[in-house]
Amino acid sequence: MSVTSESELADVIRSAHGPLSVRGGNTRGMAGPGDALSVAGLSGISLYDPGALTLVAQAGTPLAEVEAALAAEGQRLAFEPMDHRSLLDTSGEPTIGGVFAANVSGPRRLSVGAARDFLLGVRFVDGAGRVVKNGGRVMKNVTGYDLVKLMAGSCGSLGVLTEVSLKVLPVPETSATLCLSGLDDRAAVAAMAHAMRSPFEITGAAHDPAERTTLLRLEGFETSVRYRLEQLRSLLALSGAEIGLLEADASEDAWQAQRDVTAFQQGEGDIWRLHCRPSQAPEIVARAEAKSHIYDWAGGLIWLRMSTGVDLRTRLGRYDGHATLVRASAETRQSLARQQPEPPAVARLTDGLRAQFDPRGILNGTLEEAA
């Protein structure tokens, strides 16, 4: 079943007698069990004001359409949302609603913030069929629930997004990427931390242990980027790495591959995403005993390929962070869910939110933390 208007969506939800599997482009693996309900028909950019750096679009609008409109005005989604299709082997078109429903943020998150930080307002239909609006086209505080932030990352479990208002940013004049070669995990995380503590405004910091390459991205006005590159080279001269500069095309390809985790597209095993304090990343990876791994966000985000059926959460025990299973067979997901249910405090919070916004429990799955 598909809908083409907010009122139609509200009618469908109010009259539903069982679970609904809500999806837009269905590229990010968020749809839960139940009757398929597509909101891809809720499409189109309602308002775009380049001077005010704001855009309003219906939730089913293809992400490519939004990015094309922004590019025509020299603007972009600064948080560079990941495209999950290669990792999850899905097809279809990612939608702007799906981006915010999953709070999808790429390598630039460490400098500009997450997708939720650019969300100004939302309209959605909750599990009782009520149309809810929160926020607007300007940043402001609200009373009660901050529904704008709450909806970002809720994966359709609290309500079905119908419209989003967001902030955009100009495309910088130039971008450049330093490439450090030959560092092991600990040395790479230390080098990234050193760069992040500097005043040189790093907008991407990643490390690929398989290639022993560490990438540091700088963006801005050309003269500023040139100066910061020189200073960063001097700052990292004692790291023991060979330091080079990626060509423009190679830099763009490298960050797209990092954003979409294309290195894990093929191969056996389960894929996990883990958030932690960057300083703890090498020790956590050692405990995980992963088949392979990649660092992003200067070590704050780790992608791991684990042997099939291994519960990474159990293997790691207590640590300051959060692990999410991203790609696995249905059997593995069921097995891991039985092994480790939600912590009681999280379950109480989740249940309370669901009781408020989806009292019949008919929307997508369960609420999970999204980064």
Image (cartoon, rainbow, N blue to C red):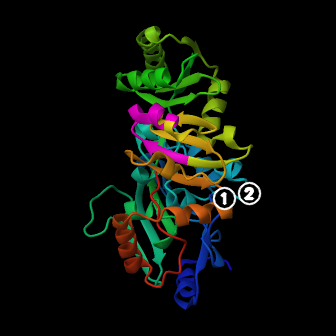
Answer with mark 1 or mark 2, whichever residue precedes in sequence: 1
Residue 276 lies within the magenta run: yes
Q: Residue 57, can we see it?
A: no
Q: Which amino acid does label 2 sit on?
A: Ser
Which residue is tagged 1?
27
Q: Which quarter of the picture shows residue 289?
A: top right
Q: What residue appears at the point 64 percent right and 27 percent down from the top-left corner?
A: 210
Q: What element carries label 2?
A: loop
Q: Quadrant of the N terminus?
A: bottom right
Horizontal side of residue 64 vs 177, given as left or right: right
Residue 317 seen by the camera: yes
**Which residue range is magenta in the image?**
273-286
Residue 5 on image: x %, y %: 58, 77
Is disc 2 surrounded by few (<14), some (14 to 19) or many (20+) residues within 10 Å? Answer: few
Residue 15: image x %, image y %?
A: 56, 91
Q: How crowded is mark 1: few (under 14 residues within 10 Å), some or many (20 or more)?
A: many
- Tell me whether circle 1 and circle 2 mark residues in contact (CB < 8 Å): yes
Q: Where in the figure is residue 47, as x and y percent of width and height?
A: 50, 60
The residue tagged 2 is 91
Give yes or no for residue 108 being in the magenta stretch.
Answer: no
Relative height, residue 232 to residue 326 (above, below): above
- Name the magenta segment's main secondary structure: helix
Q: Which residue is rendered at x = 51% and y = 34% of the image? A: 286
- Judge whether 91 appears above or below 210 on screen: below
